[in-house]
Image (spheres, rainbow, N blue to C red):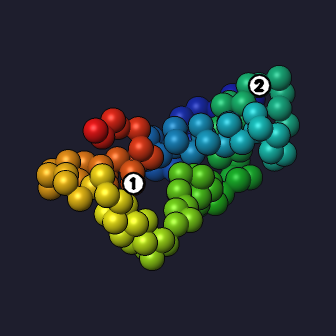
């Protein structure tokens, strides 16, 4: 296929917006060193990604799973650790005289990384 058109790709991925997401993700993968499944023919990465989708050399389902995996965030802290930290924070003497709203703001700030000035 010398030129790729949207109509060639829509047969494989019926939603145009989904097609853009999948092709963009694949183009970034190619830019990061993923092996090509079609000849480059002097095309740029987005065109190569669209050609791969049109030729069905890459699976849209696999690309969608890869997108999901890259967007997932793993929180390594457990609930027990969070609760222990909250109890320790409440036990500090400076928090004994705080108003409830200030205490809640301080706890949220600690949970969010401590970027907010508390006192």
Mark 2 Cα shell of 10 Å, populated few (<14), some (14-19), many (≥20): few
Where residue 3 appears, x then y in whole percent?
69, 28
- Quadrant of the image occupied by residue 116: top left
Q: Of label 2 and label 1, which has the lower sequence position?
A: 2
Q: How many marks?
A: 2
Left or right: 94 as drawn, with respect to 18: left
Front residue (pair 64, 72):
72
x 84%, y 27%: residue: 41
Residue 83 falls in which quadrant of the image?
bottom left
Element at label 2: loop
Instruction: Please give the name of the residue rendered at 25% of the width and 48% of the height, measured from the top-left corner.
Output: 105
In the rendered image, the vertical position of residue 70 relative to residue 90, given as above or below? above
Q: x%, y% of residue 40?
A: 83, 32
Near mark 1 (Cα within 10 A), the count class, few <14, some 14-19 or many ≥20, is few
Q: Relative to 7, say whether 111 is above or below.
A: below
Q: Determine the residue positioned at 83% across, 23% down.
A: 42
Question: Residue at the spot x=74%, y=52% of the render?
Answer: 57
Residue of label 2: 43
- The residue beneath circle 1 is 111
The furthest residue to the bottom: 80
- Give coordinates of residue 25: x percent, y percent: 61, 42
Q: Is residue 57 visible?
A: yes
Q: Is residue 104 visible?
A: no
Identify the element where label 1 is drawn: helix
């Amino acid at each position: 296929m010398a030129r790729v058109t949207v109509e060639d790709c829509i047969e494989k991925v019926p939603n145009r917006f989904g097609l853009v997401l999948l092709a963009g993700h694949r183009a970034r993968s190619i830019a990061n060193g993923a092996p090509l499944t079609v000849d480059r023919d002097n095309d740029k990465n987005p065109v190569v990604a669209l050609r791969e989708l049109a030729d069905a050399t890459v699976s849209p389902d696999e690309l969608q799973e890869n997108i999901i995996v890259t967007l997932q965030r793993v929180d390594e802290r457990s609930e027990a650790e969070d609760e222990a930290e909250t109890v320790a924070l409440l036990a500090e003497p400076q928090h004994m005289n705080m108003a409830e709203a200030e205490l809640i703001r301080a706890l949220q700030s600690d949970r969010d990384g401590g970027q907010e000035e508390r006192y």
